[in-house]
Image: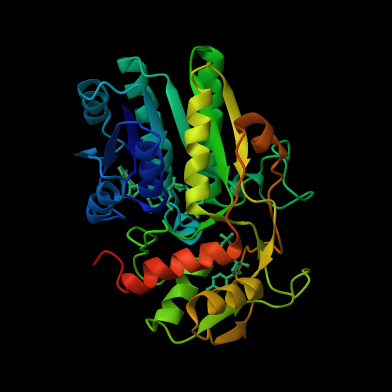
Amino acid sequence: MILVTGGAGYIGSHACVALLSAGEDVVVFDNFSNSSPKALDRVQAICGKPLAVVEGDVRDQAALEKALSEHGCTAVMHFAGLKSVQDSVAEPLEYYDQNVIGSHRLLRAMRATGVRKIVFSSSATVYGTPQFLPYTEQHPLKAVNPYGRTKLVIEEMLRDQHVSDPSWGIAILRYFNPVGAHESGLIGEDPKGVPNNLVPFVAQVAIGRRDRLNIWGNDYNTPDGTGVRDYIHVMDLADGHVSALKLLDTPQCFAVNLGTGAGSSVLDVIRAFEAASGRPIPYDIKPRRPGDIDAYYAATDYATRLLGWKAVRSLETMCADHWRWQSSNPNGYA
Ligand code: NAD
Ligand code: UDP
């Protein structure tokens, strides 16, 4: 049985599909602060298999211990936390509380119940300003905002824990830019309020919820002047988690990139989404967004060697699947 914290969220719900499809049993632990229980009904419909749900906060160690022991858990996938860079600048204490204290309580609950395997959602933001590209796992770690620093502190806490007790199995997965949705169109990303991220915003323009996209800068040092990122299909990402979990049968601690290795510009994404949706994406060029980096993308060799995993879905598939979710659920889970 795998405890999936934040399992009702965007990436967690797709990971639940991947886990159930791989024959694992799942208990989701989520406070639904940024998700809907409906996502979990849909996960069960996709897989034709039930999962257990515990409503709770990851800062509540006693609730975690109860869930881990009552469900006989052998491993944890830890997605629960806050993820907006902008909000983390405005509310750093909230970010340290939910992300760092939440992860700390989770590790203590695991230690108390003898569960020693964890797959953790880290982020490419731990690398900070690129000193070279692609980012390899050896790139210096220097997060440049509070959100990234919470991820870095958690990574260090996990590495320290492994040094103190090498019988733990710890997989730190550094995600690049997850987009897309399960091919069924039943689950997907459902941001509250105005989306910060590119693809959810583009999708809402395509469906008519927003008039136009603002492109934050076209004077970057990139082939077409717009920002370049490594977009990865959320189901490829989810499959990467299952591969990482399998390795933890042997105690070890590793940090690995989950990306495609390919960079796409904002204009590439717009063109791919227009083709997938058959809708125009009108846009305006606006000044750069503070703190944005020209370009970054992943080195993928280590993931291929270590996990025997590779992202296989194209930008076209990411947009087609994202559009299927958006067009069949114009208002998300609401
Ligand atoms: P999400 O907000 O969709 O999912 C997070 C889930 O955790 C939600 O269901 C939310 O209700 C739950 N949650 C939040 N705080 C909680 C708490 N204190 N206790 C219990 N549950 C709580 O986010 P996501 O995009 O699925 O991201 C999942 C993880 O991946 C996060 O840790 C995020 O930082 C990390 N990550 C995301 C991205 C991305 O672009 N989406 C990139 C890199 C890393
Ligand atoms: N972007 C944009 N308009 C938006 C949102 C994003 O032009 O409304 C650009 C942003 O400047 C960056 C790219 O799209 O170059 C990806 O941004 P996102 O926020 O999705 O990911 P991140 O910057 O966190 O990697």
Q: Quadrant of the N terminus?
A: top left
Q: Is residue 256 visible?
A: yes
Residue 202 screen position, x and y as percent: 49, 75
Residue 310 quadrant? top right
Q: Quadrant of the C terminus?
A: bottom left
| Residue depicted at x 79% and y 49% | 132
Residue 279 screen position, x and y as percent: 49, 84
Display coloring: rainbow
Residue 191 screen position, x and y as percent: 37, 64
| Residue depicted at x 62% and y 49% | 259
Q: Report whether 331 appears left or right of 230.
A: left
Q: Is residue 98 visible?
A: no
The outermost residue toward the front is 48
Residue 263 screen position, x and y as percent: 69, 60
Question: In this picture, is 22 found above or below 236?
Answer: above
Q: Observer-nearest residue: 89 or 268?
A: 268
Q: Report whether 256 appears left or right of 207.
A: right
